[in-house]
Each structure stands twice: as structure tokens, then as C-alpha cells.
Amino acid sequence: MSAALRDALAAALGEAHVSRDPAELALAGSDVFEWPGAVPPDLLLRPGSAAEAAEAVRLLAAAGFSVVPRGAGLSYTGGAVPHAPRVAVLDTRRLDHVSIDAGDLRARVGAGATWEALAEAASRHGLRAAVAAPISGSHSTIGGAASQNLPGSMEGFIGVEAVLADGSLARAGALAQPGGEGSWRHHGPDLTGLFLGDCGAFGIKTELALRLVPERPAAFASFAFARGSDIAEAMVATMRAGAATRAFALDRLRSEGARSLDAGEAARTLGAVVAAATSPVQALRDAARLAKAGLGGGDDAPWSLHVTAEAESERAAAERIEAVRGYCAAGREVDAVVPRTLRARPFSIRGMVGPQGERWVPVHGILPLSRAAAALAALEAMAEAERAALDDAGMAVNWLVASTGPHVTIEPMFYWPDALDPIHLAHMSGRNRARFGAFAANPSGRALARRLREAMRDALDAHGAVHAQLGRFYRYAEALDPAAAALAHRIKLALDPGGRMNPGVLGLGAAGEGRGPA
């Protein structure tokens, strides 16, 4: 990088917000998994406004640099990991403003604002985002989620502002209307949707408008089940009838000997339970209740289903839960501490690691209701067929199955002993860094996780799955029919003719670039 470019960027952003520190670059060029072919960025930029972001991109484009946008960096699909030389990572977290318009039920937020910040601001007005926030929302950014997709709730984004590859600013939807104060996303062609789920391939989001909705009364129920197939059938019936707002299922974290889940492990598996506690004593009590009732009903019923039903009144919510009980008759009702606690305190993060600090990485698919049970059965059979390899690696497979509408997300998660990376350690408390830093590097375990993730991704695709957080792992362009793929490439070419905006992501890179490592 030339001294002239370095000076120009420092003048535009401020000296403190242009970094070439090797440790910062290593962190900015990583996510929670390992990606062969990754290339460390040449510099890290932290703009404090949309104008600064636009000027930075303009300067970089003139100098022949590519740009990779980044929020909290909590991806596990390589979507914010550079795979080409001459790359600058643009960290959006200084773009963190939050503005609530309670009268028109909308919010304007900087792309780097966290979901927790938005939730706190909206809650003062009895409101919340229509978009269902990720559990990592204490750290993950709204712009990052908009780039990655969230299952079933992207309609809650009603406007977007983005920096294009040439450094120009584009606005769409509510933010394109006079003063950026519009309340509508759909006014002519849906240009807002162009920038949702694009992983930064079409532009770098700097501001978003979101629809807000009133908080509503809720009722809760949890059930223990013996088999994943029973869980899938109960969830599908519940969501098909519209009886629940949210349902998710877990199995106990398993390893050799199906070790029992004690209170401490239960709390670590769902950190929000402890995070919601008002005192250490309450945390221990809730964790004990969670271990006893929330994550299954014993060895004979290791699966648990947790349901939230919202309605216009407490009575109506309770009536919906009564209907849910009918759909869950194959299970045994247990204490609903899990959904109650997650409703009260929905955000938690403890370094993206397992109960004992194991390395963690998931794979997922979003399926039609009618295909969920068969897909889950196929994945369970795949895991069982790999039992010997899993045991040799000390690897456990944990299952999360969730729904917020006419779809089911199935997410197998792999845990194995392995050295942690700086991105894991950066999101841990000092106590956990000391506790969980002892594992030696385990390349064979990492290779097994990579192989199983790819196999399960392909199995999910065979059952008709689509995916959020596409990055460089899930298929996008090559999974579309030829006409749709051609349209996506034409849009990319029109907005980014040099292929410098997060090149290679979504399979829409510059000429000659492929999808990147699987």
C-alpha cells in the first residue's frame, strides 16, 4: 500500500481508525472456523459515518483494492474472510446510532449497532423489532444480520443505505423516500431486498430502517420427547396450525457414554439462562431447573421442545398454549424455564465454544414444514454412521431444530477438543480465557468437522433446504436455475464491474473466481 493511500485514508477516517497492526489484521481476517485459502487483509478501516465509508471505498477502488465488510465477525461460513490479495476490511461497528420513531413504528440504525442496543431502545416504548434477532445479538450487528439473512424474518427490514463499489451511496425503500423518513419498503421494485442476504457482494450497508411492532403478552410451554422424529412432528403440527410464535428443540449434548448433563453444563449450553439471573443464587437455581426439566426429561427423553405463543391478551396466549399441548401429546410437559428466560433475556454469547471450551461449528438448512422430519432423520442417520470417527475425535453432535413460521431450521452443531483462535478468545471473559485455553491444536478433528459439515450441507440440499449466512460455504449462484443465476451475475456486474466488493462471496466474484473453499 502506498504512503499516499495510507495518508488519504487517515485524513478521511482519522489516524486511529486505519490499522495495519498484525494482530488486528489477523482477527479482522478470520471467523469462527478455519478457511483454507484465506488471505490476511492489508489494512483494517473503521469509518464513523456513511460519508467516511464512502470516501474510503472510493479511495480503495482508485488504488485497485478490494473491500470486505465486517460487523462482529461471528460468521462461520467465510463470508467476511478475505480470499484475495490487496484487500481492506471495513469494520462497521462505529456506525452504531439507533433512532426510534414510535409513532410510525420504525427505527433507523447504523449497520454496526447491535441487536441488543436496538432492543433496549425500542423496549422503552413497549416495542421491539419485527425481525427476530439472533441470540448473539449482544455482539452481532444489525448490518451483519441483514447481510447474512435471518430465517423467516427479513421482511422487517424496510430500507437500506449502502456504499457501492465505486464509493457512491445508494438508498432504497424507506430510506430512499424524502428525508429518509419513509415507512414503506415496497414502492415499485424491491430494491431493498437486493442488499439483504447479499453477504456484502452488492454493497456495504451503512444504515438500515426496520419495522417495529408492539410487545405482546406471551405464554410458554416445554416438553420432553424420546425421539427427534416426535419433536419434528410436534413442531410441524404446531407451526402449521399457527398456534405458536416460536418453537425450538434441543437434544442434550452427547459424547461417549451419553454423559449426564449437570447444572453447570446446562447453564453453559444456554448461557442466557444464567445471564438473565439477578443474582448468583438465582443463576444456580435456574441452571439446576434447566438441567432437570429444560433440556430433556432424563435418559428416556433426551429431546426438549420449547414453545412461545404470543397473542393480543394473556388469555389468548394461554389458549394458544393449550392448543400446543394437543400437538405435543407424544411428549411429557416439563418446566418452561427455557422459553421464559430467553424471552426475558434473549441475548447471550460465551465465545462460540462448547460446555468445556471445545471448538464449535454448526451447519444448517431451512426446510419446508413437510420435509423437516425426513431431513432430520437423514441427518441423525449420518451422524450415527460416523459414530466411530466421532468417538475417535472426541467429537459430540448437538442438535437445534427451530421454527418461527412455515419453515423449520435444522442445525447440527459439532463440538470437539481443539485450540481456540483469537476470535474465540476476544469474546470470552478473562476467567473463561484462563479456563478454556488449554486444548492443543487438533487438525484431524477440524478435518472431520469440515467433512461432516459438507456432507450434511449436501444432504440438506437434497431435501430442498435453503440457507442463511451463505458466505463461501453454502451454494448460491450454482444452486439457482440458469436464468436466475444469470440475473444474479448481471446485477453483480452492473454494481461491481471490477469484482472488488467482497470478491468470491456467493459465487459472484470477479472473472475467474470460484466459490472458494467448501
Image (cartoon, grey):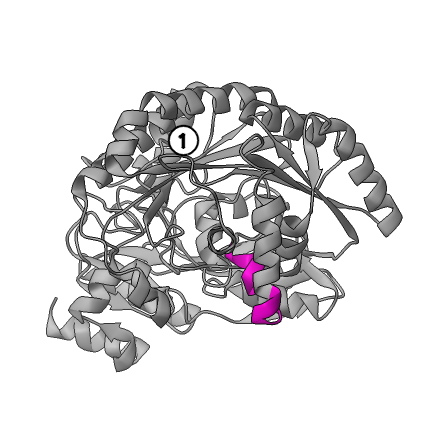
Left or right relative to 420: residue 42 = left
Report the front residue among 404 and 56: 404
Instruction: Give the overall secondary structure of the magenta segment.
Output: helix
The residue located at (74%, 33%) in the rendering is: 242
Q: Residue at x 37, y 26 (%)?
A: 383
Residue 52 picture quarter: bottom left
Residue at the farthest right position: 315
The stretch of residues the image draws in magenta is 270-282
Query: Which percent across, then down, holds residue 163?
Result: 40, 58
Viewer-closest of 243 and 255 = 255
Q: Quadrant of the N terminus?
A: bottom left
Residue pictured at 80% horizontal, 33% vertical: 323
Residue 297 horizontal/vertical position (percent): 60, 38
Magenta region includes residue 121: no
Q: Name the foreground residue: 197 vs 371.
A: 371
- Mark 1 — residue? 487
Q: Position of residue 107 (x, y in %)?
A: 63, 63
Residue depicted at x 17% and y 52%: 39
Report the number of numbered marks: 1
Estimate the x, y position of residue 32 in percent, counting from the top left. Answer: 31, 51
Q: Secondary structure at mark 1?
A: helix
Residue flagged by tag 1: what amino acid is it?
Leu
